[in-house]
Amino acid sequence: MTLIQKILRTLITAICLFLVVPASAVDKDGNFVLVIDPGHGGKDPGAVNGKNQEKTINLNVALKMGKLIEDNCKNVKVIYTRKTDVFVELYKRADIANKAGADMFISVHTNSAKNKSANGAETYLLGVEENRASANLNVALEENKAILFENDYETHYEGYDPNSPESMIIFEFMQSEYQKESLKMATFNQNQMVKSAKRPDRGVHQAGYLVLWKSAMPSILIELGFISNDAECKYLVSQKGVDEMGQSLYKAFCEYLDYHNKQLDKAVPTSQAIGNEDTDKSESLPVYKVQFMSLKNPLKSNDKRLKAYSNVSYFKESGVCKYTCGDTTDYDAILKTKAEVQKKYKDAFVIAFYKGKKISVKEAREIEAKNK
Ligand SMILES: [Zn+2]
């Protein structure tokens, strides 16, 4: 194939893959799901310096971070792509995150360079950065070479050639809907590595990482430091280094979680949205709905439960997302809806809103009577 044909085929594949969204992208208990991905493992040591191997540094720091989150963050479920020294294909790492309906994917790596004096920490999100392209390209190319340890990488990364910088073009279209959140997480992470672990600052950048490519959620890749720099390597393999790096990653995640929860609180509650379609009706008459489910976090837009009934929406109350269906000023009609919903959600019940505020059904019935 000519280069043009190759690029076209790659682009089409990339776009198709991009459109594949996980079927059930939510934790049933409403937890924030974090996937931690310690880079390399097993037969793939990653970068090395003497007897020191990248895979070990990545795993130690990732486990430290995960332990702190599990011990201190309520409503966060931590999933690892590996917890031991085993080999996991890059595409499987994204698979694990997609299947878990993860809210964040964090890949932990350690850098390496020919120039032994290069040092410092950096954080990446997926994409192509114009001004710094070649430096990022080399880091990403190195990390992506992990697929050379896979038996049949051609079938899983169609169009991507780990030895060809040209194939990096597939990532140009990957600056996705998750970019804003990925950048937030990357920035928190970079600041903490500099502030809390006192690492030299190499900044936040974008590059084409295969491991982030197919993850359908905000995602970052961390380069903790340079294993090729003797002083930095010594730090990263020490207990002090592991503790400090793990702690800085943990602190950054807490900041992101805080940001994430605040974004949720800003989501427009249904009660405020009522009346958009028929202002007069909702001004004078209460609106009835059936509440059938409460969750800590809103469902993803592709969740099947959103389509199970008509007019499914949610409002936030005491930090919980309460899901409703039906939307009517007719009390008899809502009782029928309730009976229908109770076939599946037996605790479903009727609630009422009036002028954008939730009121008791009794109050709503009284207002209705006055308006007759
Ligand atoms: Zn790596």
Image (cartoon, rainbow, N blue to C red):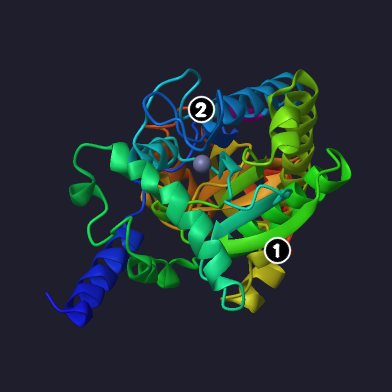
Tell me: residue 42, above or below residue 167.
Answer: above
Q: Amino acid at mark 2?
A: Tyr
Q: Position of residue 333 (x, y in %)?
A: 45, 52
SS at badge 2 = strand
Residue 321 vs residue 155: left or right?
right
Q: Amino acid at mark 1?
A: Gln
Residue 301 vs residue 49: left or right?
left
Between disc 2 and disc 1, whose residue precedes? 2
Query: Which residue is the extreme one toward the left?
Result: 1
| Residue hosting label 2 | 80
> Quadrant location of the N terminus?
bottom left
Q: Position of residue 5 (x, y in %)?
A: 17, 78
Q: Position of residue 269 (x, y in %)?
A: 68, 57
The tag on residue 272 is 1
The tag on residue 46 is none
Query: Which residue is the extreme one toward the bottom?
Result: 4
Q: Residue at x 58, y 36 (%)?
A: 34
SS at badge 1 = helix
Using the image as rendered, state which of residue 334 and residue 119 is in the foreground: 119
Q: Main secondary structure of the magenta part?
A: strand
Question: What is the magenta range?
Answer: 74-78
Q: Position of residue 50 (x, y in %)?
A: 56, 28
Q: Residues within 10 Å of mark 1 (few under 14, many from 20)?
A: some
Q: Residue at x 65, y 77 (%)?
A: 280
Using the image as rendered, state which of residue 345 and residue 44 is in the foreground: 44
Residue 216, visible in the rendered structure? no
Q: Residues within 10 Å of mark 2 (few under 14, many from 20)?
A: many
Q: Is residue 367 magenta?
A: no
